[in-house]
Image: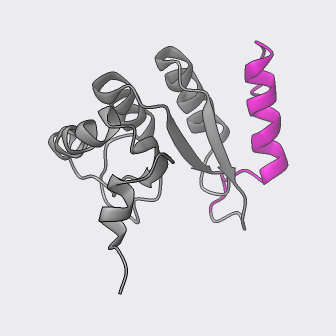
């Protein structure tokens, strides 16, 4: 009928971005990174999405996962940050972590504020803008 998707990926020059699963340990992150490493060296994988929605599960910090991907396989992760779940303090902590690792790709997600500490999209964007300008007003 046609080539399977995997076969297509093996014979294309177009890099794709893959989404990392939700990890429960650093060991899982390392195993996933080692699997991606072979594809990355072959130019199949151009990036990796790291999403922060643990649904009540204890998971490694998404910024840490992104930093590990950058270190292990030299891929620039795209970190998804849901503004409606983040407090200004966790957002700023995440931004500092990302800047230390040199990660610049952030996908800021909007939505209904789910907690009393959650940020509206424009508030979160304002904190990111302030961070990039070198000043953050946490008052």
Q: In front here: 41 or 60?
A: 41
Q: Quadrant of the N terminus?
A: bottom left
Q: In front here: 75 or 15?
A: 15
- Pinpoint residue 128: horizontal percent, then vertical percent: 74, 31
- Compared to residue 45, the image places residue 105 above or below, namely above
The residue at 28%/52% (across/down) is 23
The answer to whether residue 134 of the structure is visible from this angle is: yes
The residue at 38%/57% (across/down) is 9
State yes or no: residue 83 in magenta.
Answer: no
Q: In front here: 98 or 126?
A: 98
Residue at the front extreme of this rendering: 1
- Compared to residue 38, the image places residue 14 above or below, namely below
Give the left or right position of residue 85, taking residue 131 as reference.
Answer: left
The residue at 55%/28% (across/down) is 93
Residue 112: name its quadrant: bottom right
Give the left or right position of residue 75, taking residue 31 as reference.
Answer: right
The answer to whether residue 136 of the structure is visible from this angle is: no
Residue 29: name its quadrant: top left
State yes or no: residue 138 in magenta.
Answer: yes
Q: Which residues are magenta?
A: 115-139
The mark total stands at: 0
- Pinpoint residue 22: horizontal percent, then vertical percent: 33, 57
Colour scheme in use: one colour
Q: In front here: 15 or 79?
A: 15
- Pinpoint residue 46: horizontal percent, then vertical percent: 47, 40
Give the left or right position of residue 123, taking residue 118 as reference.
Answer: right
Q: Quadrant of the C terminus?
A: top right
- Compared to residue 108, the image places residue 97 above or below, namely above
């Amino acid at each position: 009928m046609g080539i399977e998707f995997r076969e297509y990926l093996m014979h294309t020059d177009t890099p794709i971005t893959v989404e990392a699963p939700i990890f429960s340990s650093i060991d899982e992150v390392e195993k996933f990174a080692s699997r991606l490493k072979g594809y990355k060296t072959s130019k199949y994988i151009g990036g990796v999405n790291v999403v922060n929605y643990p649904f009540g599960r204890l998971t490694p910090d998404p910024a840490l996962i992104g930093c590990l991907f950058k270190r292990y396989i030299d891929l620039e992760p795209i970190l998804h940050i849901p503004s409606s779940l983040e407090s200004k303090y966790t957002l700023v902590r995440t931004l500092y972590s990302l800047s230390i690792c040199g990660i610049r790709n952030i996908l800021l997600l909007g939505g209904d504020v789910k907690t009393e500490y959650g940020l509206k999209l424009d508030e979160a964007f304002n904190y990111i803008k302030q961070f990039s300008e070198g000043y953050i007003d946490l008052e």
